[in-house]
Amino acid sequence: MADAHIPDEQVIPAVVAAKLAAFYRADPQRWTQDWYAHDAKGFDCDATAPEAVCWCLRGAIQVLEPSLIGRDRAVLEEFDRALGVVDPNYESLRIVNWNDNRHRTVNEVIALCDRVAGIGYQFSWFRQQCVLRAA
């Protein structure tokens, strides 16, 4: 039986989103707003800085998937779609502005990550493929 193939631009966003949801679920204090990352004293720092202790959604992508730095468009577009925004004039600030809304909560961030992860077709397909390959 031939494996069904889902292109990387569909699989990668789902996998990254699932990692993000797990990352924030494991420790909700890891989430932050208003900058890519903050250190233990609350100062802004680079997302990949060793002193970073909490990350916004975009910064967490850089930490969890460093190979996507500068190449995260497919992931960000999938988040935009989950937010109901489909625009060929792509602007990566949408997810940043959504994350930084002062009324946003970590639970809403986790819920969005779950939605992008698919908790449905894409993620189920990916898990099934992992099980089939392990067998």
Image: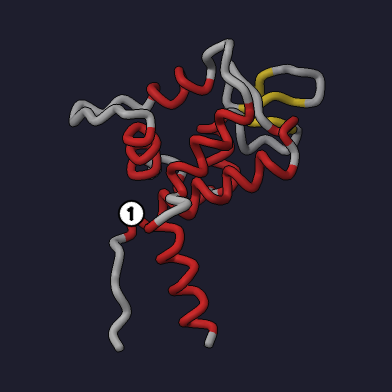
Residue 62 image point, x, y percent: 54, 41
In the displayed orientation, state which residue is furthest to the top.
102
The quarter of the picture where residue 44 lies is top right
At 50% from the left and 46% from the top, the residue drawn is 17
* Residue 129 image offset from top left, x and y in percent: 44, 74
Residue reaching furthest to the left: 88
Residue 32 located left or right of residue 91 = right
Q: Is residue 103 left or right of residue 74?
A: right
Image: 104 above or below 80: above
Q: Amino acid at mark 1?
A: Gln
Where, by quadrant of the figure, is residue 122 drawn?
bottom left
**Residue nearer the viewer, 135 or 54:** 135
| Model colouring | secondary structure
Look at the picture and state if 96 lies above or below 58.
above
Residue 115: image location, x then y, percent: 45, 42
Is residue 83 visible in this depiction of the protein? yes
Mark 1 Cα within 10 Å, few/some/many (few <14, many 20+)? some
| Residue located 37% across and 35% down the image | 82
Is residue 52 something one can see in this rendering? no
Q: Is residue 39 above or below residue 16?
A: above
Q: Which residue is mark 1?
A: 10
Front residue (pair 110, 69): 110
Residue plotted at (39% across, 43% down):
75
